[in-house]
Amino acid sequence: MSSDVRAWIGTLFRVVLAGILFWSGAAKLFEGSEAMNRAIVAYRLGLPLDLVHVIAWGLPILELVLGLLLLVGLLTRWAALGTALIMTAFIIGIASVWIRGYSIDCGCFGGGGDTSPEGRDLRYATEILRDLLFTGMAVWLVAWPVTKLSLDRGPRPTYDDTD
């Protein structure tokens, strides 16, 4: 694959992930900390309430910052790594409540908390697959952070078109 094609694919992934992070971060912030507290507590991780409050405010802000960095293409590799780690944490969280038999709304795009068990398996499977897709996009950007329309500067690596 040529470096130009790889760069355009990376640009698409950057913009898609930025949109997802903006959407999820903004939805959580506009709902307020009480809704986020409820969503976090629903995971039943036994976190101290002070830590729940920090996560309730910090996670949406982190998502917005990562989204902005990805949108403009600044510190792309680091922003993508942060995104991949967040998505991995979401996958682990959803899998943990699924394995333990709880029925919650993940709170990924606002909302959150306990919910009806109807359709739980399909909902959790869909959420995990969605987050795996986003994780894959982020990992691509960690591996190949050079994209088009980016503020990242510095030496541009040359790719062998035969790989």
Image (cartoon, rainbow, N blue to C red):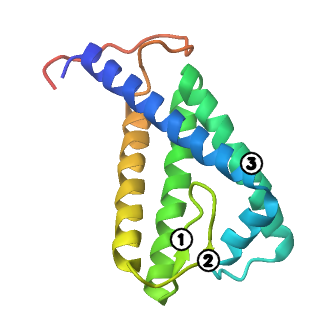
- Which residue lies at the image location 53% right of the left edge and 28% below the top edge? 76
Q: Residues within 10 Å of mark 1 (few under 14, many from 20)?
A: some
Kindly state the secondary structure of the residue where label 1 is placed.
Answer: helix
Which quadrant would residue 67 be assigned to in this image?
A: top right
Disc with the residue nearer the chain's start (1 vs 3) = 3
Which label sits on residue 30?
Answer: 3
Please, which residue is most extreme toward the right here? 50
Is the Cβ of the residue at disc 2 closer than 8 Å to that at disc 1? yes
Which label sits on residue 93?
Answer: 1
Q: Amino acid at mark 1?
A: Gly
Q: Amino acid at mark 2?
A: Tyr
Q: Is residue 50 left or right of residue 41?
A: right
Q: Quadrant of the C terminus?
A: top left
| Nearer mark to the viewer, of 1 and 3 | 3
Q: Is residue 157 left or right of residue 31?
A: left
* Residue 54: x %, y % from top left: 81, 60
Give the vertical position of 66 relative to 6 (above or below).
Answer: below
Kindly state the secondary structure of the residue where label 2 is placed.
Answer: loop
| Nearer mark to the viewer, of 2 and 3 | 3
Q: Residues within 10 Å of mark 3 (few under 14, many from 20)?
A: few
- Which residue lies at the image location 44% right of the left edge and 26% below the top edge? 145
Is the Cβ of the residue at disc 2 closer than 8 Å to that at disc 3? no
Q: Which residue is mark 2?
A: 43
Q: Compute the Cα span from label 2 to label 3.
A: 21 Å
Q: Quadrant of the N terminus?
A: top left
- Which residue lies at the image location 55% right of the left edge and 16% below the top edge? 152
* Residue 34: x %, y % from top left: 80, 65
Disc with the residue nearer the chain's start (2 vs 3) = 3
Q: Compute the Cα span from label 1 to label 3.
A: 22 Å
